[in-house]
Image (spheres, grey):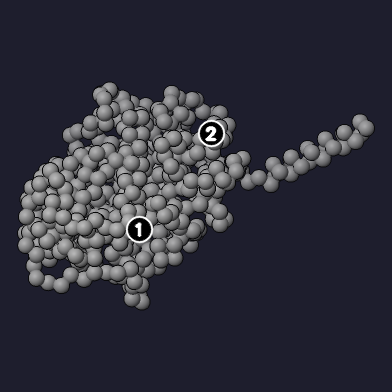
Amino acid sequence: MASQRSLVSVLVLCLLCGACAAAKRRYLSVSMDQLLRSKAHLDCPPWKKSVTSSGNKLTIPAVCALPGPPPKCCGAFERHVLNHDMNRLSTLLQRSSVSSSAAAPAPSADPFPGIPFGPAPSPRPRGIPFYPPVAPPAGAPAVTIPDSTGTSLDTLEFVVTVGFGTPAQNYTLSIDTGSDVSWIQCLPCSGHCYKQHDPVFDPTKSTTYSAVPCGHPQCAAAGGKCSNGTCVYKVEYGDGSSTAGVLSHETLSLTSTQALPGFAFGCGQTNVGGFGDVDGVIGLGRGALSLSSQAAATFGATFSYCLPSYDTSPGYLTISSTTPASNDKVQYTAMIQKKDHPSLYFVELVSIDIGGFILPVPPTVFTKDGTLFDSSTILTYLPAEAYTSLRDRFKFTMTQYKPAPAYDPLDTCYDFTGQNAILLPAVSFKFSDGSEFDLSPVAILIYPNDTAPATGCFAFAPRPSTMPFNIIGNTQQRGTEVIYDVGAEKIGFGQFTC
């Protein structure tokens, strides 16, 4: 009997050793210089062009304990970032509520009571092309524009610069995969215009501007509201910010040689709330009014972006008819559409690999509510069971480093002072169809405290009870080309491309 027990013990030990040998331990050695350059830095006022900021650091003064949303550049990290992400969630849910509404409301003479509208600039008599979602011509050209962090413009989102009008006037806009309507502030600002970085757009100085008439198909896509025969729009955000004005057509210059005529956008007459100093928003959602949808017939139904690893170097936004990854190491997973959230991009995450260790969490924990890919949420939010397992494994691999105080909701932080390099466990998201998304080395930690620049925190958080789905945020997307092949309904990942 004793010999049998010994034999069983030996067999179990062999199995365990075999499993250990089979497991692929995956770690990333990252220099402190690389990590410190990968910190997104938020300049406190005054904004200075001469200031050089760098990568994945969100520098928020830990003072100004005021009630409500933190004012510009004020408030503790947790209030600033967590408020941003919860407001972002509210925005996404509002978008879904509007997008999934049944029929568009009937036109009304006063669609937004209490919000003043100035007269729309006189439309010029010319035909405005409406681009249905059809395939582009063979050999359609691709267009690529730089993107960058928006921290110097007091936004935690990423931005691009494009031109509106003829002649083109340049504007820097936040990119948003959760929005369909693109908009900029417009004169005469009959309601209110906030202070932005560039001069407010003046439609009267463009030879290609026109207001969208009531009854136009794109007016219906914007909600079907009209005022004096002109289509109007209103977009509200989770933090109480909003923009309202005239739905308009204009030439959108993406580069000096590539333009999209007849682009439908919101010409904002009343714009209130916390948009920082950016000039507006570029919508990249799945709806008919997004830039990606309107550009599909000209440039193609695929767009991609690479959110830069460092503030000191740009990433890019590309629209094309082919997969534009800069290398062939691309993996694709299915793009899931949810009927309650038709404009948003979901994937079917089933597991996470950290350092070669697969989390012992059933796939249904992830798939029950779905996982959203979003360009404007900062952190990645996971179900509590999955987050706890991931965090505990991360801590297990980081015992050689000195723990640091937490920055709620980031509960796992380390003081890397004096370290020349850090050994991090590689993190990969695994999807139901077998594809994987390997995170860049700069997408695992975030640096919340400017007074302690070597303090890094695990850039994941447990999903709040009010969050109805998981979210993969923009911190985890940095350094990776994320490819949205809307025509083929798949999302791809080109590793470490910017």
The crowd level at tag 2 (other Cα within 10 Å; few <14, some 14-19, many 20+) is: some
The answer to whether residue 67 is above or below residue 318 is above
Secondary element at tag 1: loop
List the single residue furthest toward the bottom: 138
**Residue under pointer 2:** 388
Q: Amino acid at mark 1?
A: Arg
Seen from the viewer's position, the closer of residues 384 and 49 is: 384
Coordinates of residue 402 in the picture (x, y in percent): 49, 25
Secondary element at tag 2: helix
Instruction: State the CA–CA distance, disc 1 to disc 2.
Output: 33 Å
Coordinates of residue 373 in the picture (x, y in percent): 42, 50
The crowd level at tag 1 (other Cα within 10 Å; few <14, some 14-19, many 20+) is: many
The answer to whether residue 294 is above or below residue 436 is below
Instruction: Describe residue 444's horizontal placement relative to residue 201 as left or right.
Output: right
**Residue under pointer 1:** 286
Coordinates of residue 187 in the picture (x, y in percent): 9, 51
